[in-house]
Image (tube, coloured by chain):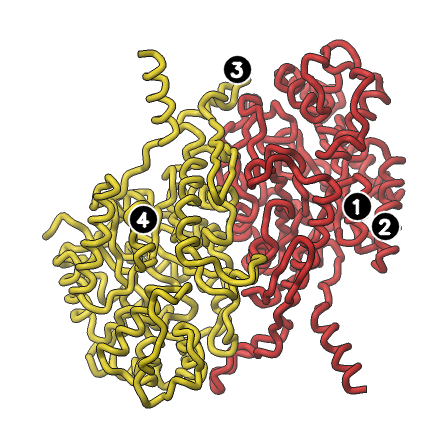
Chain colours: A yellow, B red
């Protein structure tokens, strides 16, 4: 038995990560707007002792409303509701640094942390795509580099706001009539190229101080950002070698930022398609792929690749003259991953669509529970992963299968907890509660003044 | 028995609307950050068949952190959590049009409406004060008139986003592989002086279509806005005559906007301080007023009046040379109300502080349950009110007393429901579900084209 423990995050996505999952006979195509559906999924994950569950998000409706369910509940609202019917599992909301104000978002995340007694996480995204930009007064999306520059400054502001109250600021002295000590609550007076924010926040320092900071970009800018800020990284890694190189790279960057590499958890995505036999698993996968409408999928692929859909022939490989990653101002790492996958495995457009329908670039693993557990163990023990972002192809059935059949194997092997030992999301992931940067600054200034 | 029914909204505010309520022996000074506390209050109000509960809000920490609890949970987050443990009561969040993006806020309100099965309301505020402005990149607050111009355009954008999906857009046709009909989901392509928003929203039209639109400004701009948009108006009215004039004024403006005056509910605030005898009620009031720290309260008053605190002598009336309402760019109607109250009743600064500590300009009613019920009935039956915004001086005890002692009297008199008859907040208030403006526009354009 190893002392290092595996981490599991449930990536909640519609009726499942396979784009045709809503068309299965048992699927509820209205589930995305149904609180009871999400409560049920959260309960299954919590009963299986998952560290956390996670909601992706983008403030935009993508083009193909026919293709799959798209109307959804905003993550901080949904997670606040899920906080009520769960007690241990972490709750990670995606929110954009490009299309929020730091004061408002820092405050809502602090609120979720209060409501959940310290179970909030924030998946930090810069939001690719001009469609989103056009919901916020812009003609086109900001450049990739500018989005990351704004994201860095956003984090500076947000962490200062979370530190604007000392932990001991509230004294609640009824006799003296003093609720909070004024000198323990400080303005932040942030002045930067993107933001001017006076603060302080209008909430005390929350149970975790900061939500767990999660990030998923794997471009150069994305990895630099992760090295500086991320405490957990969601990533799409097709092979164990690439995953290990990625993990080493991000942890090295954390060290360069003066951080402990143990405090950055690498969580590759995995799409398990489970069967009691390999054959059963392959049948389920084939059934799902048959339900993909190829013309929708081709349009989606063409948009990611920034090419005309007509230029993609179903039974031929991708065209040679695709743009370079440098020219892509959208989701750079997604783009590169898809192109490399198609080239490496010489896939036709139709085959590529099948692969993306399941995992959208993440590793689809079709097999028996033992086979999936073996893979997880191998990746975990060789440093390719600190845990996994579990992306069931079909929900809730794929989650139920994973919880009932794979998790017990991982527990028997001593890789995964059988009971929660911590209370907060930080405790689940073995992450420290951040020290207060602003009070440290004040203390060192006072020391200089008195010396 | 009258067929017109009274409406009751619970204004949740800290440990009560009296600023010293947190200092009472039974008060929990940490209650504001405690979900269980809010769940308890919501349950009491729902058991008493209140139409709704409401949370005020401003994205700022005001100066006096010593004076009373200020750190709080953001309203859409808190109401999402309360939606889970209630099933009928309406949930009204305050949110600012000056410091939000329409896409984000329209979406969160739609999300709360989905989560609660049609119980969301939005108290629309423009957010006075330069301290809030300085959390959002501005040096000072926008002018009062500009804030209202932005608010009007914000409502144009938000309602178009809520109408961007037809009610019948989602068909969920599994066999055909068509989830949503693309021609029933439309871009809004809004272009205006404050906002450019393409849309559509990334959520279907919610159970109520729009949250119930509530507003509370009583300045000229505020009343004009209410006439155009508000379906319920919270207002501070010190006398029955002024309340009736106000109600007539707002309803006349609604008619001028082509609206049914019955679809604007006027809800004056009332701070009940209840005792089984008048003497007992007066003792409670006196106990509360003794707990106000006058130096804090004077600073707060000075800020509202835009004068130096030192210019306010405790045992003298307000100085004569106060600014005109025209010069106030903050909360105009609050300013005027306070100055008029002080002048009309020749109050000293100390007496004025006592009055404001309880009701902050709202009518404080100290007496027995029958006396309070008599007042409510008189205001309701003479057209001064369609219902009341109940602001207990102390929570939860003041709410419990109102629910146990005043509500049954109102029910016996046939003024107030004994059971909920509707499901949604709109149904509680007798408000229609809005027709879809965008689909009406398309229909009339098609009619022109084919004629």
Q: State left or right for residue B175 relative to residue A152.
A: right
Image quarter of the C terminus of chain B: bottom right
Q: Are marks 4 and 2 in contact (CB under 8 Å)?
A: no
Residue A120 lies, in percent from the top left, at: 39, 47
| Position of A364 relative to A82 (above/below) | below
Q: Which residue is mark 3?
A: A175
Q: Which residue is mark 2?
A: B251
The crowding category of the residue bearing disc 1, from other C-alpha atoms within 10 Å (few below 14, some 14 to 19, many at least 20), is: many
Residue B322 is drawn in which quadrant? top right
- Mark 2 vs mark 1: give the one in front: 2
> Real-space Cα distance between discs 4 and 2?
54 Å
Q: Which residue is mark 4?
A: A230
Residue sitting at 47 percent across and 21 percent down? A183
Q: Which residue is mark 1?
A: B266
The crowding category of the residue bearing disc 2, from other C-alpha atoms within 10 Å (few below 14, some 14 to 19, many at least 20), is: many
Residue sitting at 65 percent across and 23 percent down? B300
Q: Earlier in the sequence, mark 2 or mark 1?
A: 2
Residue A384 lies, in percent from the top left, at: 18, 59
């Amino acid at each position: 038995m190893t002392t290092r423990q595996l981490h599991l995050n449930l990536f909640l996505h519609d009726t499942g990560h396979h784009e045709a999952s809503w068309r299965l006979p048992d699927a509820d195509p209205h589930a995305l707007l149904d609180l009871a559906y999400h409560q049920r999924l959260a309960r299954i994950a919590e009963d299986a002792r998952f560290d956390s569950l996670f909601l992706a998000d983008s403030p935009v409706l993508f083009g193909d409303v026919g293709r799959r369910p798209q109307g959804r509940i905003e993550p901080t609202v949904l997670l606040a509701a899920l906080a009520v019917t769960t007690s241990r599992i972490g709750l990670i909301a995606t929110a954009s640094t490009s299309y929020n104000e730091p004061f408002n978002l820092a405050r809502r995340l602090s609120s979720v942390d209060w409501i959940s007694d310290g179970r909030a996480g924030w998946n930090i995204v810069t939001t690719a795509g001009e469609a989103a930009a056009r919901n916020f007064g812009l003609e086109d999306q900001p450049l990739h580099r500018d989005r990351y520059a704004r994201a860095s400054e956003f984090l500076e502001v947000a962490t200062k706001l979370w530190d604007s109250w000392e932990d001991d600021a509230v004294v609640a002295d009824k006799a003296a009539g003093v609720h909070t000590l004024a000198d323990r609550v400080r303005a932040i007076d942030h002045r930067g190229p993107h933001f001017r924010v006076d603060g302080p926040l209008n909430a005390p320092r929350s149970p975790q101080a900061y939500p767990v900071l999660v990030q998923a970009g794997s471009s150069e800018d994305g990895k630099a950002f992760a090295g500086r800020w991320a405490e957990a990284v969601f990533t799409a890694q097709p092979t164990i070698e690439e995953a290990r190189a990625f993990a080493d790279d991000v942890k090295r960057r954390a060290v360069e930022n003066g951080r402990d590499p143990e405090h950055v958890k690498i969580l590759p995505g995995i799409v398990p398609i489970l069967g009691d036999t390999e054959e059963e698993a392959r049948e389920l996968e084939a059934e799902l792929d048959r339900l993909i409408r190829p013309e929708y999928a081709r349009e989606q692929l063409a948009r990611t690749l920034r090419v005309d859909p007509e230029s993609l022939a179903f039974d031929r490989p991708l065209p040679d003259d695709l743009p370079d990653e440098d020219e892509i101002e959208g989701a750079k790492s997604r783009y590169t991953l898809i192109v490399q996958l198609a080239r490496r495995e010489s896939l036709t457009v139709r085959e590529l669509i099948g692969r993306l329908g399941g995992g959208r670039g993440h590793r689809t693993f079709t097999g028996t529970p033992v086979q999936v557990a073996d893979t997880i163990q191998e990746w975990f023990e060789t440093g390719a992963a600190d845990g996994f972002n579990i992306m069931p192809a079909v929900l809730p059935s794929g989650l139920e299968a994973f919880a009932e059949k794979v998790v017990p194997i991982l527990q028997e092997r001593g890789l995964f907890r059988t009971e929660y030992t911590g209370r907060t999301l930080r405790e689940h992931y073995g992450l420290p509660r951040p020290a207060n940067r602003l009070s440290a600054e004040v203390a060192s200034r006072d020391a200089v003044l008195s010396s």
